[in-house]
Image (cartoon, rainbow, N blue to C red):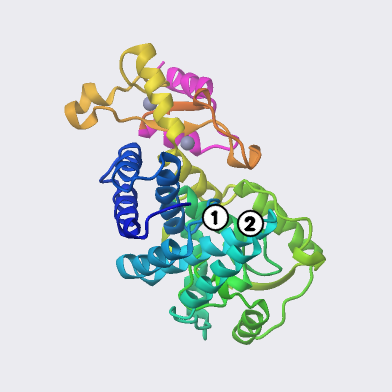
Amino acid sequence: MKIDSQAIPLAYSIAKEVCQGTLKPSVGVKKLAFEANMNVNSAADYINNLKLMLKGRRFQRTLNYASMDYFLDKISIDYGQAFLRKALLALNQHIVYYEGIGKKKTTAKKMRSLLDKYKETIDSPEYIVNLTQLKLNIETLENFLTSTDELRVISAQKLIKQGICYVAYQVGNELRFAPSRYLGYKGNEPYKYLLDIHGKETNKVIADILDSQPVESPDLDKLYVSYCTKLGFIPSAVGRFGVQRKFWQLKLEEDFPSNDDAIDGFPEGKIVERTHKARERNSKVVELAKHNFKLKHGRLFCQVCKFDYKKVYGKVGDGFIEGHHTKWVSDMPADYKTKPEEIALLCANCHRMVHRKRPWLTMENLHLIIKNNKA
Ligand SMILES: [Zn+2]
Ligand SMILES: [Zn+2]
């Protein structure tokens, strides 16, 4: 991408404003194109790249060396090490992609030299030394898995999907799985240390803490696969590189506090329930379902009991209603897009009741229950 070197700081500051939400993307693109005298597509690339770098996601368009150098430097100053790591992760994925499509080797080499330069400025990770630190990593992984931020969910899923050695941790009668190469680093977050993964080292550390070696187990492998399926993704057939997955077993005394309000005693487990609810809280499709419902009925009310939040609570209740996904996450293929028709709009009471039974009550079921109990 051609850019006047004097325009690089401008490109960064406009891109930053867009990322912070203080400038509309379309306005940012026009502004940058105009002020830096560059074409609109290149301006859009600069803005998009910063967005993807801050999210740790691969970008496709290459910035020139000076621009990339400036962007990385500013990210570390403005956003700190955690985001610099993400940006480097994005750059790393970009290089792999770039080499993969057979583009110019010299460009990839230059980018790699930048990657190495900035990698040296970040602290190297420390390994965990005790069970408490291991549990903390498990908890972080669970929080990512049930986050309303889709990118966090995906990064947690990827980790669980791609491991070779796992800690199978049992909470109550539920078995969940976390990969060793993630668990072994102190204070870890999914993909925080992706640039410096050494599975061998983390396995050693965990074997020490749990005082045992991981073992192959067809039974645990089946349970692992079913755990992934319930969470809505399909794991690789065997561990990567054709290696059989191995497992440690760990029994936890208590569940993590974040699971406290998930309903116990259903076969799919608390984490799956939490994941599902997080999707219901966040999804754009819920907003769309609300919008469609309002167009059709003129206002929002519970589809089952007709409760109208605005009528009862006035201004505070205006616009409030909960969306219930009538499909289970595990019944959807990984790239499944929920349709607004699959969202039932329910008051908080009806929603809770629906979640108390397996299989879930249908809207008709619930309607009938209410009617019969009134009689
Ligand atoms: Zn209701
Ligand atoms: Zn629901």
- Magenta-highlighted residues: 348-375
Q: Is residue 211 above or below residue 21?
A: below
Q: Quadrant of residue 290?
A: top left
Give the labeled residue for mark 1. 58
Q: In the rendered structure, does residue 367 fall within the stretch colored magenta?
A: yes
**N-term-proximal mark, 2 vs 1:** 1
The crowding category of the residue bearing disc 1, from other C-alpha atoms within 10 Å (few below 14, some 14 to 19, many at least 20), is many
Q: Is residue 351 above or below residue 371?
A: below
Q: Are marks 2 and 1 in contact (CB under 8 Å)?
A: yes
Ligand 1 shows up in the quarter that is top left
Q: Secondary structure at mark 2?
A: helix
Q: Is residue 296 above or below residue 336?
A: above
3D distance between C-alphas at marks 2 and 1: 8 Å
Q: Quadrant of residue 357?
A: top right
- In the image, residue 102 lies at what x, y percent? 70, 56
Q: Is residue 117 left or right of residue 175?
A: left
Residue positioned 47% across, 20% down in the render: 367
Residue positioned 52% across, 86% down in the render: 129
- In the image, residue 164 lies at what x, y percent? 71, 68
The crowding category of the residue bearing disc 2, from other C-alpha atoms within 10 Å (few below 14, some 14 to 19, many at least 20), is some
- In the image, residue 327 lies at what x, y percent? 58, 33
- Towards the viewer: 256 or 60: 60
Residue positioned 52% across, 80% down in the render: 131
Q: Which amino acid type is marked by label 2?
A: Tyr
Q: Is residue 231 above or below residue 212?
A: above
Instruction: Answer whether residue 253 is visible to the viewer in this image.
Output: no
Give the labeled residue for mark 2. 97
- Towards the viewer: 65 or 247: 65
Q: Which mark is residue 263?
A: none
Q: Which amino acid type is marked by label 1?
A: Arg
